Image (spheres, helix red, strand yellow):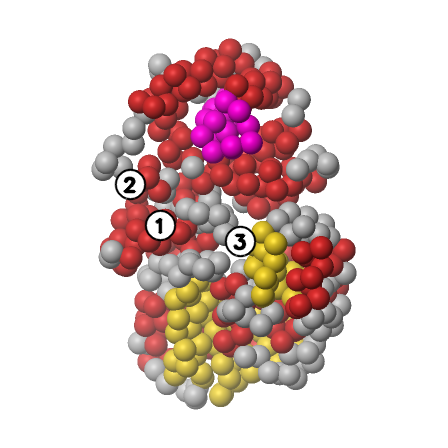
Amino acid sequence: MNRDWLAVFESLKDVYTDGAYSNMAIGEALFHHKGCKESFVRNYAKGVLRDTIRLDYFIDKLASKGIDKIKSRPLIILRMGIYAIESLGSVPDHAAVNESVNLARKVARGSEGFVNGMLRSYLREKDNLQIPADRDDLLYSVNPAIISLLRGQYGEEADGILKALNEPQRTIIRVNRLRVDRGDVIDSLNAMGIEAEASNESPNAIEASGSGIVSSDMYKAGMISMQSLSSMIAIEALKPSIGSRVLDMCAAPGGKSAYMAELMDDEGDITACDIHDHRLELINKTQERLGLSIIRTLKSDGTVSNPKMEDSFDFVLADVPCSGLGVMSSKPEIAFRSNPESYAELTDIQKSILRNAVFYAKPGGRIEYSTCTLNKDENEKVIESIMAESAYSLLSVIEMKTLMPYNSKVGFFYCILEKNSWD
């Protein structure tokens, strides 16, 4: 049994049937199957997820009773098999079929004949399986409701956005400036066989291609972290100053709090909040690995006001829960799992958190509202709605920016507000 394929299957099963996030599911599978080819497993699993809607269209066309009659495990294997035939250049067609059948024999016993027949049918018919011209959801493998939303908000640019969101991104490494020089990290990565170069967008970012970064000695020693370039740019725009008091309202797993601590030379105070104990522990582990000391965790619900924190912080970060449409390239399950009909519930949460963020900032303090979505209803319109409320009319917008998912960035929005006065 090919352990790489088994690891891919287990990660996909967790995403498709248990609702897991792909990054966590793939990490768990790699942990349980030590010795697997990490890059192969990650790229294969993410590729299948990224192409799910289109793969399912082909499977439905080939299955005599339609896709709805296929059980979950053989369906996952069929997705894997067709994707391997189409996109894994290192795997010959016959090997893709054989590996899929072997996998079915291992995890979906009794379905191996069906899997074999379906994949051989695909090999015979693949040149005749055409995507209809009016099915952009198949072209981009994205929920048509998401396509409609983006086109309604961005017009002609939406197709460029969708294309970018359907492509894998380069890995972004954040250098811990308190422990190591960026040039030294690049030299070390290149020596490991990892292509790496300095980013022009951030003084502490490296763009890289390769595997083994998280398992490297540099990572374990707290010299580097993984963080999106867009997120780094947003934190740099806030400019948390050395010695200041900072609140991170939705902090787990702690990357943004840690980057603020690094920019502050680990001098000052950062309160990092989450509603779950196990996620607060992730923040503590991140701080420990990076050798930081100024982050303290607090169990707190960002939607519930805490009078004890009124007018207390120089900087408040409200990186709120969102639809995640800007990070579909790295979290491809969003493309078929997310439903725009539910986004209105998110905006209510986002507004509650932002109101509290303003309440917690000192007069003259700054608040950053950020999301990893491109949905303007969760971005600009949330800001407009809050500022239209009389209690917040004296807020000033210092900077508001949408980062598009081009040039190694993910889709991201941030708005920096200044609290001029409070009535």
Q: Position of residue 411 (x, y in %)?
A: 42, 59
How crowded is the residue under tag 1: few (<14 C-alpha within 10 Å), some, or many (20+)?
many
- Residue 136's tag is 2
- Residue 280: tell me if it is visible: no
User: What separation in Å lies between label 2 and label 1 (alpha carbons)?
Assistant: 10 Å
Amino acid bearing label 2: Asp
Residue at x-position 52% and y-position 63%: 229
Q: Position of residue 308 (x, y in %)?
A: 58, 77
Q: Position of residue 62 (x, y in %)?
A: 36, 19
Q: Which residues are magenta?
A: 72-93
Amino acid bearing label 1: Leu
SS of the residue under disc 3: loop
Which residue is nearer to you in this view: 51 or 266?
A: 51
Quadrant holding the C terminus: bottom left
- Residue 162's tag is 1
- Assess whether mark 1 and mark 2 are in contact (beta carbons under 8 angstroms): yes
